[in-house]
Image (cartoon, rainbow, N blue to C red):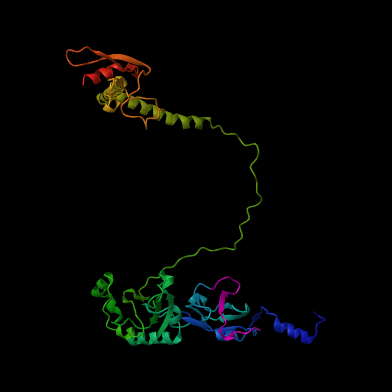
Amino acid sequence: MSTMSAAAVAVWLGTVVTILSRSHGDRNVYPSAGVLFVHVLEREYFKGEFPPYPKSGDAGNDPITFNTNLMGYPDRPGWLRYIQRTPHSDGVLYGSPTAEHVGKPTVIEITAYNRRTFETARHNLVINIMATEEFPLPYQAEFYIKNMNVEEMLASEVLGDFLGAVKNVWQPERLNAINITSALDRGGRVPLPINNLKEGVYVMVGADVPFSSCLREVETPHNQLRCSQEMEPVISCDKKFRAQFHIDWCKISLVDINKVVPVYITRPDPGTGILPEFGEYNPPSESLKSRDYFSDFLITLAVPSAVALVLFFILGYTMCCRREGVIQLVHHSSIQKSTKELRSMSKNREISWPLSTLPVFNPVSGEVVPPIHPDNYETTSMPLMQTQTNLQNQITIPQQRPSGDNYVMSTFRRLEVNGIPEERKVAEALNL
């Protein structure tokens, strides 16, 4: 690199995209304790601090985002909030410092990122919180505005219009905006992206005079009943806000801090963070006495066993010596005997055969052929009337003829079902 000429270096710097981080001087602001603090991080201010981008493009519309944190810490102080809706809009730092921050400079590191060139610019914002004699204002009212987002309400023109409307209704000598909070930070839901719905914002203002009669109209029983029924209360001064601000009067909060009982929480002394000196660790000696666990083992087994034995004797006495127990035993014994008897009878019972299993008569020879075949015998193509003769296991039975004629012997297959000859079934069939 040292051998390159000045012209070559200039060309190289003009063609290579560099990622720079510029540090600028501190900027001091002096907000008052108990009064809303708003600081806008303007994109236009940081655009001129980024080096020119060598490629063609609209450098005036570069997306820029901001990162803010307390110097030496990863986040901001608890009272300070930050919001930036899109990379093409300005960022806003806002919050309400308290009296405990008075006299303590708060250094906020602000880092701007150019999302197109990936360059950064950094400077510090020093917040010097000043004390005020009128802090805190004794009468404080919090309004919920439904048709505003927090960044819209933080604009100086919009906030000034709202304070003007409140001053017209309240008529105080001193009126300050104390704090602004998004409804999402109070547990509200993100609105649907339809009909230009807004998130809503809570605005707290303070004054030095008591609340006006218009602000106290929401405390009347009639309006409280309408609020409980989710109906809008009737407020005479609502028309002074309705043109620009839609206020939910059921959510208004009126606080007189002169009547608020202060609650003091005593915090323990954090100490130095160093444990006291306890000396060197002294482990127990090796000559420890052994402990006998046999008695514990006996107690562990003896007590449950004794309880189980007592319960067993109580159950035996109840079942065998009491009338109710004897009745239960007799009833159980009778059920067992009946069950055994039914099972033995079911084994020996004879069930009448269905007509489909009765012998089939041959219309030519008059023979009786039972249509019973082995399980593996194909019967799908077998005719209903049997014509085969000289079947195996056939016996001869007499066939009844009209009166005056002799009896003719017929044959049928001899089968057995459960060890009982089939002749009995055939005789029953002949007598039908």
- Seen as rendered, the residue at the extreme front is 364
In the displayed structure, does residue 22 sit left or right of residue 326? right
- Residue shown at 74%/86% (left/top)? 10
What is the quadrant of the N terminus in the image? bottom right
Q: Is residue 388 visible?
A: yes
Task: Name the residue nearer the viewer: 262 or 73.
Answer: 73
At x 29% / y 28%, what residue is drawn?
A: 356
Say if 381 sits above or below 428 in the image. Answer: below
Residue 336, x across and y down, in percent: 30, 23
Residue 167 occupies quadrant: bottom left
Magenta stretch holds residue 178:
no
Q: How many marks?
A: 0
Q: Is residue 130 visible?
A: no
Q: Position of residue 169 (x, y in %)?
A: 32, 85
Query: Residue extending furthest right?
Result: 3
Q: Which stretch is magenta?
A: 54-76
Front in this rendered view, residue 118 or 314: 118
- Point out residue 364 in the picture as x, y percentages from the top left corner: 28, 22
Quarter of the image for residue 231 reads bottom left
Magenta stretch encompasses residue 71: yes
Q: Residue furthest left?
A: 403
Q: Residue at x 47, y 30 (%)?
A: 301
